[in-house]
Image: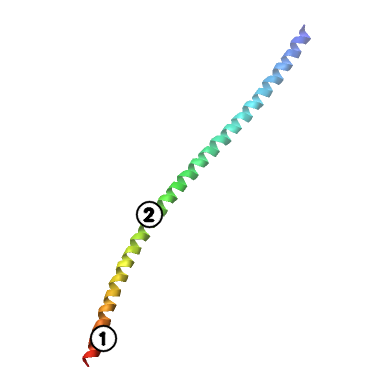
Amino acid sequence: FFAEIVEFQKIVGSLIELVDQLAKAAETEKMKAIGARNLLKSVAKQREAQEQQLQALIAEKKMQLERYRIEYETLCKIEADQNEFIDQFIFQK
């Protein structure tokens, strides 16, 4: 009977050891999963911030394009006025 108790204690001890190893492995995997989830959240936030920066840059470039378009139209009008003045000056001579 004593031998059976010793054998039972060995089996229980090895079972406890195995459960401890599995618990450590599960904890390690849990920490890896948490790290991966945090990394994904971080990447998503970075992409969102980058998208906002790019949207702001697009808006800025659109405003700059509009200013250049207006400036171009103004310069074309000035050129046309100057050409008309030159033509009138040449015809008066």
CA separation, marks 2 and 1?
Answer: 46 Å
Q: Nearer the viewer, mark 2 or mark 1?
A: 1
- In the picture, the disc for residue 10 is none
- In the picture, the disc for residue 87 is 1
Which element carries disc 1, helix, strand or loop?
Answer: helix
Along the line of sight, the residue nearer the viewer: 85 or 65: 85
Mark 2 or mark 1: name the one nearer the start of the chain. 2
Q: Residue at x 36, y 60 (%)?
A: 62
Look at the image and tell me in which quarter the C terminus lies. bottom left
Is residue 32 depicted above or below 13 in this figure? below
Which element carries disc 2, helix, strand or loop?
Answer: helix
The residue furthest left is 92
Which amino acid lies under the numbered mark 1 shown in the image of this protein? Answer: Asp
Is residue 73 depicted above or below 35 in this figure? below
Q: Label 2 belongs to which residue?
A: 56
The residue furthest bottom is 93
